[in-house]
Image (cartoon, coloured by chain):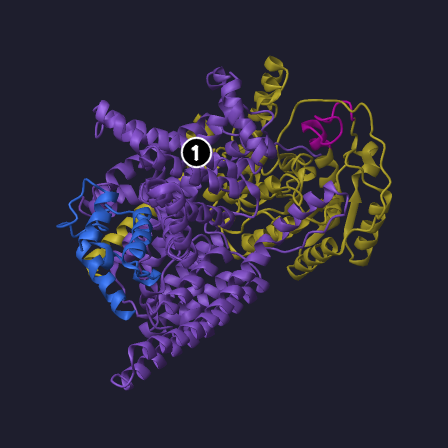
Amino acid sequence: MIAPKKIAKLAVAALITIALLILLQSLLMPKYMTEILEGALISEYYREENKDHDVIFIGDCEVYENFSPVTLWQEYGITSFIRGSAQQLIWHSYYLLEETLKYEKPKVVVFNVLSMKYDRPQKEAYNRMALDGMPLSVTKLKSIKASMMDDEKFITYIFPILRYHSRWSELTAEDFKYLFKKDRVTHNGYLMRVDVKPLTTIPTERKLANYRFSDICYEYLDKMTELCKKNGIELVLIKAPTIYPHWYDEWDKQMEDYAEENNLLYINFLKYTDEIGIDYQTDTYDAGLHLNLSGAEKLSRYFGKIIQEEFNLPDRRNDEKLSRIWAAKADLYVQEMEKQYAELEELGYLKAFNSRRNDE
Amino acid sequence: MLFTSYNFILFLLSLFIIYYIIPKKYQWMLLLAASFFFYSFSGWDNVAYITVTIIATYFAALKIGQLHLQQESYLKENKGSLSKEEKKAYKEKVKSSQKKYLLICLFFDLGILAVLKYTNFVISNINSISRIFNAGEISFLDIALPMGISFYTFQSVGYLVDVYRGKYLPEKNIGKFALFVSFFPQLVQGPISRFDDLGHQLYSGHGFDFRNVSFGMQRIIWGFFKKLVIADRILPAVKTITQNPDTYQGIYVLVGMVFYAVQLYADFTGGIDITIGIAEVLGIKLKENFERPFFSKSTAEYWRRWHITMGTWFRDYVFYPVSVSNAMLKVSKFSREKLGEKTGKRVPVYLSTIIVWFATGIWHGASWNFIVWGLLNCLVIIVSQELEPFYAWFHNRFNVRGKFIFKLFQVGRTFLLMSAIRILDCYRNVPVTFRMYWSVFTKWNINELFNGALLKLGLDKADYFVLVFGIIIMIAVSLAQRSGSIREKLSARPEIVRYAAYVGLFISIIVFGAYGIGYDSNQFIYNQF
Amino acid sequence: MEALLRILEDLHPEVDFATNKSLIDDKILDSFDIITLIAEISDEYDVKIPVEEIVPENFNSAEALYKLIQKLQDED
């Protein structure tokens, strides 16, 4: 057979090789620090030291661009985190929730129901942004299996170097700078945008052949409802007040019915834009698809009151430890705001979100 | 299963582990199961085809072998009592009986290959003719060619003919025989093995030998390197040029020839490295299929160094039988009488050569471009033979034989010639190919090499960088190989050098391999629509 | 044997067929030579060399080839 000394040498060689590959993998994976920040969203939760949140938001851009946890804290003493990602699909959301519950038990979970309209995987890139940030776990494996498109390979999720290796010819300084450590790009999951692009025209809606949400989406919604009930968590279904994609009445009705059948709170914010005080000339950065900072703060003020009353969420601003933590968060929040305003002043646009502008 | 797929790698690793855990006497059974498992990925109907060939060949060979043994014992028993004529008559009777079984089985095995592979080709030609007479067309058959059928059929036929020729006795165990035919590493693209060489290796158990496993793994990794880093990377450029002949002419044709030479070499020899490496890990030595073919100084030499086992198969089972057949001997006699000794004696040789190259061409593919490819190779070989007197005069006049610069010329000439003929594979259409050849002389666009047009073929600067680097490595390895095995030399070096080489190669494949979806950051920019 | 040597020398005048014992191993005779030889031998000695006998052992030297011819003549 082989001599023990040889086995030891082989083992050392194998370990060094694995270490090299891990290093290369970190180098080759996109960092999402200076552009395409949406890719960094999922992984920020794990670096949060104080995982003690009254409210967890899950869903797509309609959660991470429309709610501000800092505002919820400052106005109501509610702690929250937004676990959103670009075009997060309902199975992503479900498994993300399942995973989050391994770290903490919030009192309320808020889910944006736009993703009920997507009954199948949409785009490989969005799958990646939703999944790559999760550490390896059984839940992640389940989520991968549920999300994979036909031409995706499972093993490339376990070893992302197999997916991103071709970036070797496109490495930038950013890849080396953030090799071991990442910066914070969100504020408890909120991706700040201070720029403004007013709403001009509302695109006419197309008639659909079939309005009923698919079985698979209802399945996952049921699972979410079940999971929350089992853990004594209040599930709130919302529809963010965004103009596009169009939220059909038929869809709204289905969600109303579902909420009623399952004894859940469902709020379609599109119906309350006046009360919320949303002005689509000043409160959106992309002509009505998403709210900007001012819109998000308005929505948070409105929503925070509702859930605090509805679910008796305590005002925790008297907690010393939390106050310190959130004061620090608020500082960073203000700093970011000022930085973005300054950039807007200088360039007329935000670099991180418009890096392709000059290439066109 | 493709060699370069995650599934195959998983399959290999599992196989290697199980192979060395189970008792040696079961190893051949494991290989048989693995081979059929591998083959089943290409479809159960394919499995049916290969099984049928296995069964037919097994029984025919068994019968022929029986007759050999009967003949032996009969002659031994009646050693004294038979006259020479009686012995000869008896032997001829047995032979003709054996021939019956041979021919029936050949007809069956080759028939399956012929029908599956060439029916649509024949139909398309019939249609071309009937179109001239407006006589309606036959519709094509919807057949898919079973994976490796050209290879396993030839391997079975070789075995059958060897048994007929009395080279060895047939294999009695149908499972073992099935393994010989279906042995998975060589199923896809060879090498084509001979039973007396491969059989006993497959059936005897193999204990774990660190050197075999290590050398085999190295060879597998080298094969993956050539396929993934070089062949798959340059393929898009080859396709761009050869699938758009109206756009890419003149200098592009030469570029296409060279690129295709690189692509085919890296892909084919890489695949064979993986094949031979797998067998080596299992303790089995397959015959080499390539021997630094691009260092050949003549076309004849090239065909002794490229796809070697195919060449020797055609030589032993087509060329020799045809050229020493009674029919050919008659032709030989006739032509020597009519055309004189010197010319006449070349006729049977050339005729046999043409037949072999026609067969080689059509074996490669069921279309005219392959037949023309085969005949062009044949033409070059015959012309070089005829030019022998000229070469002799040339070397007498100019003392260049053996000089380095002349050898370089010979290598370059052979490389260009072979690359030019080989491009028929890509254009797939004979008139188009000849138009492209013509455009090399008539279309002057050599400036395209320098104005960045090469970056519009599907490869960017980084790709070219990797390709150049990879090609240099391949050439360096080939040059070093002339004086002995690379793996041997490497194993004599200090450990840190070996580690750097093996791991460097492995990591290069992972980072620089042309596989996967590829990163296009535009896909990641989040748009709602 | 002289007839055989004559045939061989005709093919490759530069080779000493009387002494060389590695005609195949040293690639002096190629497959074209072999079939030309077989045709001429068939003419000269009236024996047909069957394909089974086209092995290196029989063609590596003039002697071996002559032995083969004699063996085949015997069987006739």
Q: Residue at x 34, y 53 (%)?
A: B277
Q: Position of residue A205 (x, y in %)?
A: 85, 35
Along the line of sight, which residue is nearer the eye, A124 or B322?
A: B322
Q: Is residue B244 magenta?
A: no
| Above/below status of B36 relative to A160 | below
| Above/below status of B185 relative to A172 | below
Quadrant location, the C terminus of chain B? top right
Q: Tell me if I can see residue A135 in this picture.
A: no
Chain that is purple in the image: B
Residue positioned most to the front: B337
Q: Position of residue B66 (x, y in %)?
A: 39, 79
Along the line of sight, which residue is nearer the eye, B41 or B392?
A: B392
Q: Which residues are magenta?
A: A280-298
Q: Position of residue B91 (x, y in %)?
A: 36, 75
Could you tell me the amino acid type at mark 1?
A: Ser
Q: Colour of chain C?
A: blue
Q: How many marks?
A: 1
Q: Colour of chain A?
A: yellow
Q: Is residue A285 magenta?
A: yes
> Hey, which quadrant is residue B367 in on the image?
top right
Which residue is tagged 1?
B419
| Above/below status of B391 relative to B130 | above
Please indicate whether residue A38 sits to the left or right of residue B288 in the image. Answer: right
